[in-house]
Image (cartoon, rainbow, N blue to C red):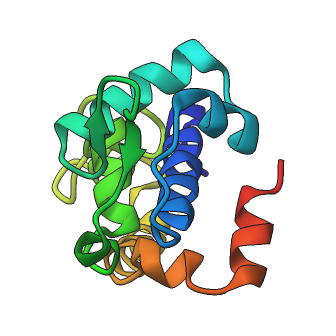
Amino acid sequence: MFSKACEYGIRAVLYIASQSMQERRVKIGDIVQNTGSPEAFTGKILGLLSRNKLVDSYTGPNGGFEIKQDKLKLITIAQIVRAVDGDTFFEGCALGLSQCDANNPCPMHHSVFRIRENMFYVQQHTTVFDLVDNKKNRALILKR
């Protein structure tokens, strides 16, 4: 459903959030090990997430990544998707055509419109905190 980059981005944010809830800052190696994503790719994704202010990045011996407690209930899955993949997931053509909208629909436009609306609603109303708040969810999400 999501691009590979987006999947890694979501898993990285969820891992960082789970550790931040325990007041732990994590290094990129920890994220790679616990999400199963390639290190170089993860670095690029974390850069995007940091530039979009979804994760906080620190340098130095006590550096790493974290999400402030007050932000955990504010960051939505939709924000992560947008930070990594832009608006393509929400607005792009299901067939990848450059000219597709309600006035000039592709053959699948009307079939996927409601699904896309529902997915957007779910992603807009699901926060990082919602997904990492209990131990069972964390175990399922971070499982590789």
Residue 124: x %, y % from top left: 31, 75
Number of numbered discs present? 0
In the displayed structure image, the side of residue 61 where residue 144 appears, left or right = right
User: Residue pushed farthest front?
Assistant: 61
Q: Estimate the x, y position of residue 47 in percent, counting from the top left.
A: 31, 27
In the image, residue 3 sits, relative to residue 129, either above or below, namely above
Q: Residue at x 52, y 70 (%)?
A: 22
Q: Residue furthest top?
A: 40
Up the image or down, 77 lies above or below 49; here it is below
Residue 61 pos. (x, y %): 40, 25
Which corner quadrant of the image does residue 41 belong to?
top right
The foreground one among 1 and 17 is 17
Q: Is residue 97 visible?
A: no
For residue 18, say whether it is visible: yes
Between 73 and 91, the one nearer to me in the picture: 73
Above or below: residue 132 compared with residue 80: below
Q: In screen coordinates, is 140 left or right of 17?
A: right
Residue lying at the far right in this picture: please name it.
144
- x, y percent for residue 25: 45, 49
Residue at image position (31%, 49%) is: 55
Work out whether 113 lies above or below 1. Answer: below
Say whether residue 94 is left or right of residue 70.
Answer: right
Rendered image quadrant of residue 23: bottom left
Q: Nearer the viewer, residue 75 or 17?
A: 17
